[in-house]
Amino acid sequence: MTVIHLQDSIVEIARSFLATTVKCQHCGGQAAMEYVGDGSIGLHVCPERYVSRIIGYGSQFDTGRFMGFVQKAIQGAQEVEAGDIRVASRYAWDLGLARESNDPILKEMYWTQNYRRTRSEDPDGVGVFFCANGDSFFIQPLKNDERLCGKCRTS
């Protein structure tokens, strides 16, 4: 069992223990974890660059700030409501870690692109994608296969 200490950063813990792959809701392939900014935001992104989930990590919940980030990222695809942001606490025991206390190690806030409320079976619908250059989100029809945002395509 791994022992963690209070000085271990939230980002280090998230990257070490929560960087999973999941089945992509868009293509059925594997969506791997990628990080943006300071590493406190993770994305499940498939090889086609579709974003299945956006996850924020921190020691406290700041759902307003996280919701603002998601709204900006998906602007033009759909509306984000407070109920679309889910929150979870992660404890040492559920990560298989040893720790002196039973207090939460970190908090997660996450948004999934295909909640039932926003799920669409429309083949001409749009989705949120993350540029292959790793610097921006973009919106495109789900059937498109572009992996670069508009800025990178014109550069």
Image (cartoon, rainbow, N blue to C red):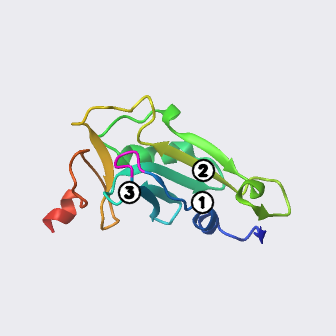
The crowd level at tag 3 (other Cα within 10 Å; few <14, some 14-19, many 20+) is many
Residue 88 vs 135, above or below: the answer is above
In front of the other: 71 or 35: 35
Image quarter of residue 92: bottom right
Which tag, 2 or 3, sits closer to the chain's start?
Answer: 3
Image position, residue 155 (x, y; %): 15, 69
> Tag 3: residue type?
Cys
Q: Residue at x 40, y 45 (%)?
A: 25
Q: For this view, does 117 lie left or right of residue 62?
A: left
Question: Residue at point 59% right, 65% down?
Answer: 11
Q: Nearer the viewer, mark 2 or mark 3?
A: 3
Judging by the rendered image, the residue that carries numbered circle 2 is 108
Judge from the rendering whether residue 155 lies leftward or rightward of residue 42; answer left or right: left
Stretch of the chain drawn in magenta: 24-28
Residue sitting at 62 percent across and 47 percent down? 61
Horizontal and vertical percent position of residue 133: 30, 68
Asked whether, in this view, residue 52 is left or right of residue 144, the answer is right
**Secondary structure beneath label 2:** strand
Mark 3 or mark 1: which is in front?
A: 3
| Mark toward the start of the polypeptide (3 vs 1) | 1
Q: Which mark is residue 18?
A: 1
Regarding mark 3 in the picture, which secondary structure is present there?
A: loop
Marker disc for residue 46: 3
Q: Nearer the viewer, residue 144 or 65?
A: 144
**What's the mark number on residue 10?**
none
Outermost residue, left side: 154
Q: CA distance from mark 1 to mark 2?
A: 10 Å
Distance from disc 2 to disc 3, alpha carbons, whole Å, reads 21 Å
Question: Which element carries disc 1, helix, strand or loop?
Answer: loop
From the image, state whether disc 1 or disc 2 is nearer to you: 1
